Image (cartoon, helix red, strand yellow):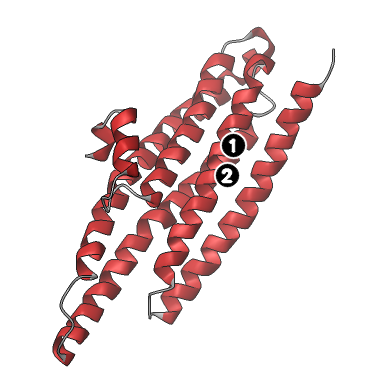
Amino acid sequence: MLTQESCRSFAALLASKQPVPGGGGAAALTAALGIALNTMVANFSRGKKKFIDYQDKHDELIARGEALREKLVDLVDKDAEYFEPLSRAYVMPSVTEEEKREKEDVLQRCLKKACSAPMETLEYTYDAILMHKEIEDISSKNIISDVGVGVQCLKAALNSAYLNVLINLNSINDEKYVNENKEKAERLVLEGSRLADEIYLKVLNIINIKE
């Protein structure tokens, strides 16, 4: 499992001439780091005198963040698991008409499977951005920069997962499947990026305020 590798080993594998991990796994891992920072901020802000009335909210964010982080980390391995059959399908023989038909059938099934992982990453990353919106006003100003770092990780993951969705959709023949997923992906990216920019600018303004 890729997620059992050290950070150094994972980066080396990512740099190697191996089919996995790839951009999809990198996007999921980046999103996991983004939501981890949200949980860290909630942990540090929880119980502070200024935010004592928000302890239940902090507890809720911590629980949701931990669950979301696990899902995103799992997607690092899931993305690799779903891509490997696709990489094998691309090298199937296609000399005879029967071989061509069989290869195309397998490719289409594998492409939809491969597309599902970055679509999940998109959905979870969008949820994580919403959670940064929830914590921006109930976090200690000493670590508000980590809200900004977290949301920047999530914006990068959002756009990266979107690229992986598109590259799979471009080779899928099922027009209904393509249209539905493309529409959903575009909506998540546009709205998620807008929210991420809004949160980041708010963090910048807080940090730049001179007392």
Q: Residue 100 in the image: state x and y as whole percent.
A: 20, 85
Q: Nearer the viewer, residue 25 or 179?
A: 25
User: x, y (%) of residue 139?
Assistant: 64, 21
Q: Position of 123 compared to 188: left or right?
A: left
User: In the rendering, which numbered label is found on residue 155?
Assistant: 2
Quarter of the image with the N terminus is top left
In this rendering, the answer to whether 117 lies above or below 88 is: above
Residue in front for this viewpoint, 92 or 71:
92
Q: Which amino acid, mark 2? A: Lys
- C-alpha span from label 2 to label 1: 6 Å
The answer to whether any part of residue 131 appears in the image is: no
In front of the other: 58 or 95: 95
In the image, what residue occupies the spot 35% across and 50% down?
22
Q: Within 10 angstroms of label 2, few (less than 14), some, or many (20 or more) residues?
A: many
- Name which residue lies at 59% across and 25% down: 146
Outermost residue on the right side: it is 211
Mark 2 element type: helix
Residue assigned mark 1: 151
List the single residue furthest toward the top: 49
Q: Amino acid at mark 1?
A: Val
| Marks 2,1: beta carbons within 8 A | yes
Q: Position of residue 131 (x, y in %)?
A: 57, 36
Q: Is residue 26 left or right of residue 197?
A: left
Label number found at residue 18: none
- Quadrant (top left/top right/bottom left/bottom right) for the C terminus: top right
Vertical comparison of 115 with 28: above or below:
below
Q: Residue at coordinates 47% horizontally, 67% vertically from top-left? A: 181
